[in-house]
Image: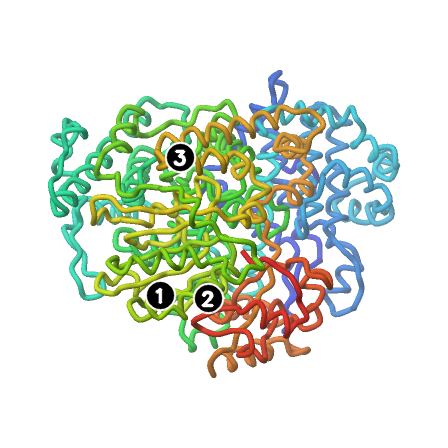
């Protein structure tokens, strides 16, 4: 028996959806199916315990009946489309063109039902308030989540009493005039956004953000189950959750620990994890400081020995914590470049899977090339059928033209990607943290999948330090309430836990970590400040002369890396070096920046990995942590210190030489590129260039202490917009504000399409044809999938300011369906040089810009 309405929906002759062939879905069928999928999500991901945990945290005075609330929440799901019972909506399904809506009417009907429960004392004040705010998800199950209390105060004008009475009568309900009057009265709604109500919401959410997590989790489960139920009617396809079942875990465990070798691209690759497992006990007793080397061969052996020890130490440490049933869910893995953190991360994930019931494994990276590398490296252990790349550039090799022509295949692939439907997922930082901070429907579908999962996050420091606090809070609350285990790893890792007063466990003990970072095998690169190489002002034609002259003297080196702060500088120095015959005749010279197309980037990286080729690579900061390359000497334009260290990690990366050098030179452009970040302000240029060499490890630790302290101090300042403002908005359920203000990157970019060959031109014509006026809606999913095929021909440029306004404003009329098509691309673009900004300015009327 329903506690909301005493009705058998099957007796109501109404429909929920219609198809193009005029077939209609009975209303009760959609309600049953939605509840089925909701229960399936709850069971598959063990969400019920999470709901209990969240409600218990909210209910400090123990006045809430958890079971009762969960039962009513299920009824919200069952009746979420009750607003479709209006004559207008039923006529719409029959083909009548009208603008009637249903989610608002569903919301008001359910508000009526909850008010009735309150009036009859079936629920108390706190239970009523929790249920009422959760009902906002019903109102927004087809839209964006806004600032909930602000939105609710405006609802009175939208409540049509006649419509409510009609629906209630169909539900065998005798309308209560007092409740109807309350629902239609402005005062009832406005009080939800007064100071007293906001304070009550703040008390409900408390410091733990539990109410925010409860709202997100319920909304995610509701909109996903609604989608699955609708999809089943529209396409006939049922949705089955693809999670880490026991047989998959056993397969990955066996591949990782027991398979001696793999055949990769017709070459045999030894799995050193087998020997680590065999030698585990002896490796525990090895003192890292006793490991020595005498030549390069011995150095490699020493490096592999330390990597093996790190595998054992981290695994033992994690196992002890898991056996102690500790509440710790966030682990920091701080390992020097070349220490093997990717391999260690999977070892740790397998240990957590062994000890806990884990549903999904997420690998989260800042750059697409890191996603590519890790996907390839770990694929031999995980198995390609068990994993998916969710980045925009990935096109499955099995996704051939025949599959593309098959609507069923296109839709299935789209749904699997939309709903993260693989056991192991590789995705970007931005896509992952969108689950928490974005308010649109697509970003909220998969929030529930984080529950009881392992999330491995690489290079978290790569993004703006202005959101480190928010990210640290998410680690804390998601780990605690959703039983999610985070492994945060990097060679340059800030102590984010200080920002939340939480305990994030350093998975390598401090004494071991200190020995590792100081070990001579990781003393690969010396960072040397060099004021003599300073880049002059941008209008100086000879601004790069000193740098180029230094490079001329390095003909004995095989690989030289030069990293600038802007695309324009990288382009200019590349052109200058190409003209210097003493360099260009001795070396292959390549340019690698954000305007180089993907195929060219891959060719360049392949060339750089060839030990027999002499190469000068000119690049931007995008080469930092995202590229697996190894150079003999480096030059880096001045930047925040962690950025300098990341580039140093590309020099002598594989410890092939005793110690190589990276020179850092002054560059005023760094202030324009990095100026907003606290990291930039905490890198003292004068102090940096006063030193002959930099002690990388101690300097980095001090640098991060200053940055974290600076963020912490700002967070404590009143009347200043800071992370604490965003944390407050999260607690207050100001979800539109959170969506607007919390971003890992400032990404206002324009996609430029370069049809540099015949295939590129053909693809563009095919893409435009999908927007045929009669078929554009029908092709919506096909368009989203087809966009991936355009990415190899596209580059992104920032929407920068010009003398004639912002770039987008100048070319807006020429942007077609998300891309600026460059018909005369050869005037300002080449495969080798990328984008010539001067040529681009002449073509589009742009005058002054810095591309990063």
Q: Nearer the viewer, mark 2 or mark 3?
A: 3
Q: Is residue 359 visible?
A: no
Do tag 1 and tag 2 residues touch (Cβ < 8 Å)?
Answer: yes
Residue 791: x and y, percent? 49, 67
Which residue is located at x 36 percent, y 65 percent? 602
Q: Up-down: is 259 above or below 454? A: below
Between residue 779 and residue 298, name the one nearer to us: 298
Between residue 132 and residue 372, name the one nearer to us: 372
Mark 2 or mark 3, which has the lower sequence index? 2
Residue position for label 1: 604
Residue 596 badge: 2
Q: For this view, does 802 lie left or right of residue 543?
A: right
Which residue is located at x 38 percent, y 50 percent? 424
Residue 479 badge: none
Q: Up-down: is 197 above or below 575? A: above
Q: In this figure, what is the number of numbered marks?
A: 3
Residue 81: x and y, percent? 68, 50
Q: In the rendered image, which quarter is residue 368 located in?
A: bottom left
Between residue 270 and residue 113, name the one nearer to us: 270
Q: Is residue 793 visible?
A: yes
Residue 259: x and y, percent? 16, 50
Between residue 267 and residue 138, name the one nearer to us: 267
Residue 126: x and y, percent? 69, 24
Q: In the rendered image, which quarter is residue 737 located in?
A: top right
SS state under label 2: loop
Residue situated furthest top in the rendering: 61
* Mark 2 neighbour density, 10 Å: few (under 14) some (14–19) many (20 or more): many
For marks 2 and 3, give the CA distance: 36 Å
Quarter holding the C terminus is: bottom right
* Mark 3 neighbour density, 10 Å: few (under 14) some (14–19) many (20 or more): few
For marks 1 and 2, give the CA distance: 10 Å
Residue position for label 3: 691
């Amino acid at each position: 028996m329903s506690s909301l309405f005493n009705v058998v929906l099957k007796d109501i002759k109404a429909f929920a959806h219609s198809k193009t062939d005029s077939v209609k879905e009975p209303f009760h069928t959609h309600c049953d199916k939605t509840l089925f999928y909701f229960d399936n999500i709850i069971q598959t991901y063990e969400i019920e315990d999470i709901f209990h945990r969240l409600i218990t945290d909210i209910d400090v005075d123990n006045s809430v009946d958890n079971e009762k609330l969960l039962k009513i929440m299920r009824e919200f799901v069952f009746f979420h489309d009750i607003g479709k019972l209006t004559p207008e909506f039923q006529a719409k399904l029959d083909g009548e063109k009208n603008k009637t809506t249903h989610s608002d009417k569903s919301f008001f009907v359910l508000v009526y039902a909850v008010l009735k429960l309150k009036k009859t004392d079936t629920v108390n004040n706190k239970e009523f308030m929790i249920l009422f705010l959760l009902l906002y998800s019903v109102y927004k199950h087809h839209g964006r989540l806004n600032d909930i209390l602000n939105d609710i105060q405006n609802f009175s004008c939208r409540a049509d009493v006649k419509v409510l009475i009609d629906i209630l009568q169909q539900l065998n309900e005798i309308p209560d005039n007092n409740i109807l009057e309350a629902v239609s009265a402005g005062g009832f709604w406005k009080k939800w956004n007064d100071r007293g109500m906001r304070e009550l919401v703040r008390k409900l959410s408390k410091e733990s953000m539990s109410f925010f997590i409860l709202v997100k989790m319920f909304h995610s489960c509701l909109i996903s189950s609604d989608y699955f139920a609708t999809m089943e009617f529209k396409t006939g396809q049922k949705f089955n959750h693809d999670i880490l079942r026991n047989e998959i875990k056993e397969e990955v465990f066996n591949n990782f620990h027991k398979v001696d070798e793999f055949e990769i691209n017709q070459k045999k690759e030894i799995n050193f994890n087998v020997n680590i497992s065999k030698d585990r006990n002896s490796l525990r007793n090895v003192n890292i400081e006793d490991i020595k080397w005498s030549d390069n061969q011995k150095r490699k052996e020493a490096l592999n020995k330390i990597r093996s020890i790190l595998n054992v130490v981290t695994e033992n440490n994690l196992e002890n914590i898991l056996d102690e049933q500790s509440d710790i869910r966030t682990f920091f893995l701080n390992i020097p470049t070349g220490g093997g953190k990717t391999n260690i991360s999977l070892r740790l994930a397998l240990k957590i899977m062994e000890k806990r019931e884990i549903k999904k494994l997420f690998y989260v990276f800042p750059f697409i090339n890191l996603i590519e590398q890790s996907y390839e490296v770990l694929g031999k252990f995980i198995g390609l059928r068990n994993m998916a790349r969710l980045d925009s550039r990935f096109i499955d090799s099995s996704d051939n033209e025949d599959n593309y022509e098959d609507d069923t295949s296109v839709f299935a692939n789209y749904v699997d990607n939309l709903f993260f439907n693989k056991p192991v997922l590789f995705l970007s930082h931005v896509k992952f943290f969108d689950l928490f901070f974005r308010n649109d429907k697509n970003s909220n579908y998969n929030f529930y999948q984080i529950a009881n999962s392992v999330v491995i996050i690489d290079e978290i420091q790569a993004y703006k330090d202005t959101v480190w606090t928010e990210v640290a809070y998410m680690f804390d609350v998601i780990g605690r309430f959703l039983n999610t285990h985070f492994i945060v790893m990097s060679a340059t890792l800030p102590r984010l836990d200080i920002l939340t007063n939480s305990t994030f466990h350093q998975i390598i003990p401090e004494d071991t970590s200190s020995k590792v970072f100081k070990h001579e095998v990781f003393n690969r690169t010396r960072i040397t400040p060099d004021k003599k190489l300073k880049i002059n002002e941008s209008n100086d034609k000879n601004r790069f002369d000193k740098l180029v002259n230094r490079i001329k003297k390095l003909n004995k080196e095989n690989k030289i890396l030069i990293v600038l702060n802007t695309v324009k500088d990288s382009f200019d120095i590349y052109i200058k070096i190409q003209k210097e015959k003493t360099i260009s005749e001795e070396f292959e010279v390549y340019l690698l920046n954000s305007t180089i197309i993907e195929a060219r980037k891959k060719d360049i990286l392949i060339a750089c990995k060839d030990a027999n080729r002499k190469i000068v690579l000119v690049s931007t900061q995008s080469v930092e942590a995202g590229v697996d390359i190894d150079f003999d000497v480096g030059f880096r334009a001045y930047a925040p210190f962690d950025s300098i260290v990341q580039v140093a990690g590309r020099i002598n990366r594989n410890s092939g030489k005793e110690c190589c050098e990276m020179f850092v030179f002054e560059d005023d452009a760094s202030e324009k590129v990095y100026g907003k970040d606290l990291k930039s302000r905490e890198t003292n240029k004068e102090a940096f260039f006063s030193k002959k060499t930099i002690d990388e490890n101690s300097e980095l630790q001090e640098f991060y202490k200053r940055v974290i302290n600076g963020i912490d101090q700002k967070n404590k300042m009143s009347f200043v917009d800071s992370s604490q403002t965003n944390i407050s908005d999260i607690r207050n359920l100001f979800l539109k504000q959170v969506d607007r203000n919390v971003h890992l990157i400032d990404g206002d970019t324009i996609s430029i399409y370069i049809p540099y060959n015949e295939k590129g031109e053909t693809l563009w014509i095919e893409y435009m044809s999908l927007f045929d006026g009669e078929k554009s809606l029908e092709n919506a999913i096909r368009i989203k999938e087809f966009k991936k095929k355009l990415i190899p021909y596209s580059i992104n440029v920032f929407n920068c300011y010009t003398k004639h306004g912002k770039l987008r404003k100048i070319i807006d009329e020429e942007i077609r369906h998300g891309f600026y098509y460059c018909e005369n691309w050869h005037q300002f673009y080449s495969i080798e040089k990328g984008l010539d900004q001067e040529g681009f300015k002449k073509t589009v009327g742009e005058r002054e810009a810095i591309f990063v």
